[in-house]
Amino acid sequence: MEYDKNNIFARILRKEIPANVVYEDDYALAFHDVNPKAPIHILVIPKGEFISFYDFMETASPGLVVGFSKAIHHVLHAFDLQEMGFRLLSNYGVHGGQEVPHYHVHIFGGRLLGRMLPEG
Ligand code: DGP
């Protein structure tokens, strides 16, 4: 599958459309999800053209993989999520139900998050 340069997160990265940004560095951009499912619901996206975790791990430089992971850690720390906990999630493909085809990690926190997955 080819990366769609006009997906909504690519446009947010290019600052063509606004987002409520909470963190940015050379590797990643983090912003509030437009449709939050928890009191804290932040999306972290790597800088570059990556569709999914799979794609990211196959093509991103080791430096970017580390930088992106550390950006997630930075946001967890900034929102003080270590003590009460959080959930990281990344959807992909038919079973995962990914909607936006730019790799992103959801950070959920701020309430009891319940069961890991809804009943199938
Ligand atoms: P996923 O199913 O993992 O691809 O989730 C995509 C998420 O992106 C979903 O929770 C809603 C969010 N989202 C979609 N469009 C926008 C947007 O334009 N701005 C922001 N901030 N979030 C968006």
Image (cartoon, rainbow, N blue to C red):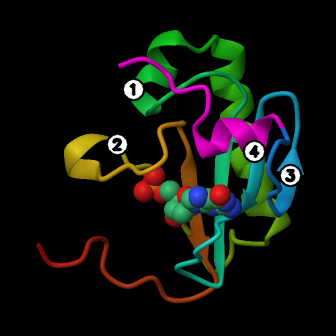
Q: Work out whether residue 71 or residue 2 is closer to the camera in this orientation and state it.
A: 2
State the residue position of label 1: 54
Q: Is residue 83 above or below residue 105?
A: below
Q: Which residue is mark 4?
A: 12
Residue at screen point 67% across, 48% down: 44
Q: Earlier in the sequence, mark 3 or mark 2?
A: 3
Q: List x then y, in percent, for residue 63.
A: 72, 16
Residue beneath the point at 42% across and 51% down: 99
Give the labeled residue for mark 2.
Answer: 92
48 vs 109: above or below: above
| Near-viewer residue (103 or 5) | 5
Q: Secondary structure at mark 3?
A: strand
Q: Which residue is mark 3?
A: 23
Does the magenta portion include 83? no
Of badges 4 and 1, the one in the foreground is 4
Q: What's the distance in space between the residues labelled 4 and 1, CA to CA?
A: 22 Å
